[in-house]
Image: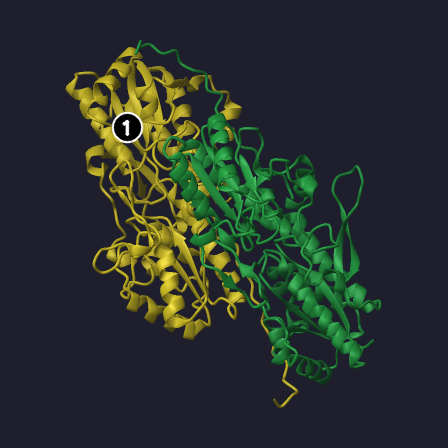
Chain colours: A green, B yellow
Amino acid sequence: MRGKAVVGQSGGPTAVINNTLVGIIHEAKEHPEIEAIYGALHGIKGVLEEDFIDLTREPPSVLEGLRKTPGAALGTIRYKVKEEDYERLLKVFKAHNIRYFFYIGGNDSMDTANKLSILAEKANYEMRVIGVPKTIDNDLAHTDHCPGYGSAARFVAMAVRDSGWDTMAMRFNSPVKIIEVMGRNAGWLTGASVLGKEREDDPPHLIYVPERPLSQEKLLQDVERAYKLYGYVVIALSEGVCTEEGEPFGGKFAPKEVDAFGHVLKGGASDAAASIIKNKLGLKVRIDKPNYLYRSFMACASKVDLEEAYRVGRAAVKAAVSGETAKMVTLIREANNNGYRATTGLVELEKVANVERHMPDEYINQEGNFVTEAFIEYARPLIGEPLPLYTRLIGVRVPKKLTV
Amino acid sequence: MRGKAVVGQSGGPTAVINNTLVGIIHEAKEHPEIEAIYGALHGIKGVLEEDFIDLTREPPSVLEGLRKTPGAALGTIRYKVKEEDYERLLKVFKAHNIRYFFYIGGNDSMDTANKLSILAEKANYEMRVIGVPKTIDNDLAHTDHCPGYGSAARFVAMAVRDSGWDTMAMRFNSPVKIIEVMGRNAGWLTGASVLGKEREDDPPHLIYVPERPLSQEKLLQDVERAYKLYGYVVIALSEGVCTEEGEPFGGKFAPKEVDAFGHVLKGGASDAAASIIKNKLGLKVRIDKPNYLYRSFMACASKVDLEEAYRVGRAAVKAAVSGETAKMVTLIREANNNGYRATTGLVELEKVANVERHMPDEYINQEGNFVTEAFIEYARPLIGEPLPLYTRLIGVRVPKKLTV
C-alpha cells in the first residue's frame, strides 16, 4: 500500500511521548511504501486544518535530541471529533494520499482513531489506522502498562519519598504531609508512591486510590493510628478519591469543571483531607501538588519507559505496513526468571476506545489504604533502575547527665 | 580548648544539609581537642532535652550515604528559644562539657546561635558558637549565597522548564501555567526559574518576586501581552508576592497562619492569580505547587551546592578550633576568569541574625516581571552542571492542498 503517513500526538504530554514519535519516524523511513511521514500539528486539529510538517526532513540530530525532550514536539490537543468534522478529515486524507495514520494517545484518542478507521472503511478509502498508547494514568485496557506511566511513576516514587523524608525531619512542627497525585479514576500513579519505601516506617504510610471510597472517619482513624506508630504521617492521595456516596472527596471545597470529553474534573481532595485532619486531630498538615510535573519531569524519566515508548512507535509502523489496521499497539509482559521484559502486541481499537482500566482488587490492601506486594512486583520494573538508597544515622544515644 | 562539640540542624531541611553535617563530623574528627561530637536531635529541642547521639560512633559508610540523603538526619525544628530556656541550656552544656556548638540553619537559627553565644559569655562559660548557613531561600545576609539554594534553584529551573514545555504542547487547551515557588519575602528561588530558558519564547515568560508589588491590572496586562506574543504563558510566581498596598496577593483567597517565629505565612498567590486570569481574560489556567519538593528533591541536587555545603561544615569546625566564636560561615565568590569558584569566610552572627537579604534592584527588570542578565550570571554557576538542552522540530511545512 503506497502512500503517505500522518502521525499525531494527542492528550496530555508525557516525558517519553517524543520517543514514540521518533520510533515511528525511524521505522517509517525503512519502508519505501511510506512515501513521506507528515506530522499533524496539535493532533487531529492539525489534520482538520491541513497543518502538516514533513518529518522526513528532520535531521538525525533533531530526532536524537527529541528523545530527551519532554512535552509533545508536534503539539497536542484534547478535542472530541464532531460529526461534521468527518467529511473534512476524509477530504484531507485523500488530498495528500495519506494511507497510514498513527495516533499517539490515551483512551479518548483511541476512540478518535477508531472512528477514523470506521470512517475510512465506510468511504471505501483504504487507510491503515494504528493507535499508539501513551498515558501516565496507565488506564488503557488490554496492555500490561502504558508508555509514560513508568516515568511518571518514578517521579511519584521520588517525590513522595523526598517530601516524606522532609516531613520525617520536621515532624515536631508539621507532622502530616499530603502529596496529591494525578489520576482521576485510576490509582496506578498514586500507588507508585510505594516504590520509594524501603522500611515499614518509611513514607508513605497511607495510599488512597480512586478505586476505594474514603470517608472522613476512615481518614481520621488511619492518620491517628499512623501518627501513633511513626510520629509523623505521609499520605499519597489521588486527586480522584471519592466518598462512599461516589462524590469527589474534595466535595464542596473544590469547584467542578467539565473537559472537552465530558469528564468531570475532580480536585481539591488534598485540601479537603488537610482541613479534616487539622480540625479534628489538631495536627499541622502540609500539601504538595506537583501536578503537571508528574507527566513532564524529564530528569526522572525511566530508562525502561523511554525504550518501550520508542519501541511501540516502531511496532505501530511495522503493524501498519504488514497490513494491520484499527489496532492499538500493546505491551505484553513476558514471564521469565531473568528479570523484566516486555514484547509488543496488538489489540482492536474498539476494545480500548473510551475504556478505563482500574487497579484490580489484588493490588489494593483490604483496608483500602495501601497497595499490596503484588502491585509492587507489577510496578517496580517499570520505573527503570532502582532508586538510590537513603541512609539513616545509627544514632548511639549519649546517656543523660541531668536528673530533670 | 578541650571539650565536646554539639551540632544541630534547624529550620526547613534541604537536599544538602546532611552534607554540612558530614563536613562538620569529618573535620571535628581531625582535631583532638574536640573529644566527641554529639548530634542534638531536632535542633535546640535536643539540647533542651539532652537528646544527644554520639556522631563519632557513626561508620564511614553511614556518613557517605548521608551525603546523598535529603531531609535532615538529626531531625530539625522551628523553635524560638524562650527566656526561661536559657538556664536549662547552659546547664546541659556544662553537664556534658560542651565547648563547641555548631548550628546549621537560616536567619532564625542564626539568632538562636547568637543568643546562645551571648548567654555563654555572660555566664563566663567558654563555648565557641559557629553558625553554618542553610536555606533554599538564599536570604542570609553577608554571604554570596547559601548552601541549599543551588539545589533548590536547579529543581525550580527544571520544574518550570518541563511544566512549561508541557503547556507549550497543550496551549490550545490550557494556555496559561502558573508554578508557585517557595519564598515568603525574597525572590531568589523564583528568579532561578529563568535558568531553564534558552530562547526568548521559551518558558517562563513572566517571573514575579516578592520584592516588587503586583496589581491585578499589571498581571492582566503582562499575561495578555505574553499570550499574544507566544500563544501561551508560563508564570513563575513567588508565594510571597504582595499587592501595592503590601497585602499578600492571595488576599481573601488564602487563610493566614503565624509560625513559631511570628512570621505570617502567606499563601494562595497562584490561586488568586489563576482566578483573575480565568475571569478577566477567559484563558484556562493550570497550577503547579511542588512546595516541599523545592527543598528536598535529591535527584536534582546541584553538585556545586553539595560540595559547598560540605565545605562550610568543615570551615565551621576549623574556625571554632582556631578560636573564633559568635560567627557564621559565609561563601565568598572569587572574581576570576576561569569560571566560578567560592571560598569560605566568616561574619558576626549578630549581623545575620533575623536579617533578610532581598534581591537587589539590578537583578529585577524595570517592569518588575522578570529577572535580569546580572541575576542569571549570579545564579547560573550555583545550580551546577548546565541543564541538558531540549530540542524542537525544525518543522518544514507541507503545502496545503485544499482551498478551504
Q: Where is residue A350 in the image (x, y as percent from the top left)?
A: 75, 64
Q: Can residue B151 be seen in this view?
A: no
Residue shown at 78%/59% (left/top)? A347
Q: What is the secondary structure assignment of the residue under circle 1? A: strand
Q: Quadrant of the C terminus of chain A?
A: top left
Q: What's the residue at 64%, 40% (across, down)?
A: A364
The quarter of the picture where residue A104 lies is bottom right
Using the image as rendered, state which of residue A383 and residue B336 is in the foreground: A383
Q: Quadrant where the N terminus of chain A lies?
A: bottom right
Q: Which residue is drawn at 57% across and 28% down?
A: A200
Q: Can you identify the residue that label 1 sits on? A: B130
Out of B229 and B197, give the one closest to the viewer: B229
Furthest residue toward front: A245
Residue B213 can be seen, yes or no:
yes
Q: Measured along the vertical axis of the image, is residue A228 above or below residue B195?
A: above
Q: Look at label 1 and name its amino acid.
A: Ile
Does residue A131 appear to the left or right of B64 in the view shown? right
**Hey, which residue is sitting farthest left in the picture?**
B122
Chain label for disc 1: B
Q: Where is residue B24 in the image (x, y as percent from the top left)?
A: 38, 26
- A342 or A143, nearer to the observer: A143
Determine whether, in the image, residue A19 is placed left or right of residue A233: right
Mark 1, other Cα within 10 Å: few <14 / some 14–19 / many ≥20: many
Question: Residue A175 location, x and y as percent?
Answer: 42, 34
In the rendered image, residue B264, in percent from the top left (x then y), is placed at 27, 45
The reply, left or right, for residue A96 in relation to residue A228 is right
